[in-house]
């Protein structure tokens, strides 16, 4: 059986790393027979190479604990695995997916009744990552039965503060931001400063997210068996 290596972005905020560990603990609890490792693409430890050396060199499925496509998914993580000679395959990132939509709704709680709900994300310079956020906003809009605009707190695209202000100018007396982030840290604080009446907690350690991680692992396993 392949090892599952969850690879998060990395953060200087201890709370962010703690959430990653709690999330991977849920994955281990859901499938006790599976070896589950933890790694970070940058900033935090263990690095991908350090985790591979500790876990063994494969077979291994690296699941990016990222919400969309971009440099880390398509370039950085594969290169780091190749540098240490790992027998590894990289899965798709977590989002967009209906499981994430359910987690977003849970985190919003009663704030789903706000006059306007906006999806807040970190941002990306990769057009594929921006498209994934747009898809996530559409999925959330379908779940809530109304349009959900989106905004970013970094990179190109509509600025979250501007999207919140536009919702108010359009007549919304209350505005809630759904946090399309995995864990607390720098970007969550920027979401909270965007001027909304309520900002949901990040997706965090949630059973729906744990199920999605295992789904991404299993999807790769199916492809590997088909090739074999």
Image (spheres, helix red, strand yellow):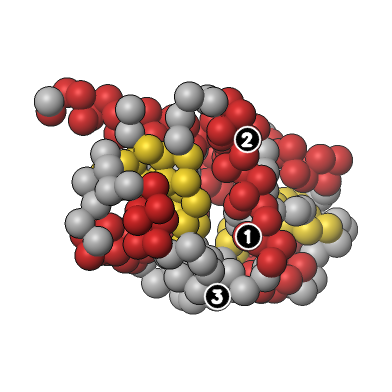
- Residue at image x 52%, y 46%? 136
| Residue 186 x %, y % | 66, 73
- Identify the mark at residue 154; answer none if there is no mark: 3
Question: In the picture, residue 159 is in which quadrant?
Answer: bottom right
**In-front residue for pair 7/50:** 50
**In-front residue for pair 198/100:** 100
Note whether residue 25 is visible.
Answer: yes
| Residue 29 x %, y % | 61, 29
**147 to the left or right of 71:** right
Q: Secondary structure at mark 1?
A: helix
- Residue at image x 68%, y 56%? 18
Read off the residue under disc 2. 26
Q: CA distance from mark 2 to mark 1?
A: 15 Å
In the image, is residue 128 above or below residue 225? below
**In-front residue for pair 201/131:** 201
Number of other residues with Cα within 10 Å of mark 1, as a class: few under 14, some 14 to 19, many 20 or more = many
């Amino acid at each position: 059986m392949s090892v599952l290596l969850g690879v998060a972005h990395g953060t200087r905020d201890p709370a962010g790393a703690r959430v990653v560990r709690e999330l991977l603990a849920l994955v281990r609890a859901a499938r006790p027979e599976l070896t589950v490792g933890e790694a970070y693409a940058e900033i935090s430890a263990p690095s991908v190479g350090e985790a591979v050396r500790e876990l063994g060199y494969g077979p291994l499925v690296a699941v990016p604990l990222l919400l969309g496509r971009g440099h880390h998914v398509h370039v950085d993580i594969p290169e780091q695995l190749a540098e240490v000679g790992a027998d590894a395959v990289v899965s798709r990132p977590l989002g967009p997916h209906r499981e994430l939509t359910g987690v977003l709704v849970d985190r919003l709680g009663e704030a789903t009744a706000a006059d306007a709900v906006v999806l807040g994300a970190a941002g990306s310079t990769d057009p594929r990552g921006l498209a994934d956020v747009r898809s996530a906003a559409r999925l959330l809009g379908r779940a809530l039965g109304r349009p959900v605009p989106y905004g970013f707190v970094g990179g190109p695209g509509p600025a979250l503060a501007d999207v919140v202000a536009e919702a108010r100018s359009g007549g919304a007396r209350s505005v809630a931001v759904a946090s399309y982030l995995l864990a607390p840290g720098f970007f969550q604080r920027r979401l909270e400063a965007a001027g909304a009446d309520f900002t949901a907690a990040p997706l965090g350690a949630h059973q729906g997210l744990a199920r999605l991680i295992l789904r991404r692992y299993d999807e790769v396993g199916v492809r590997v068996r088909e090739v074999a």
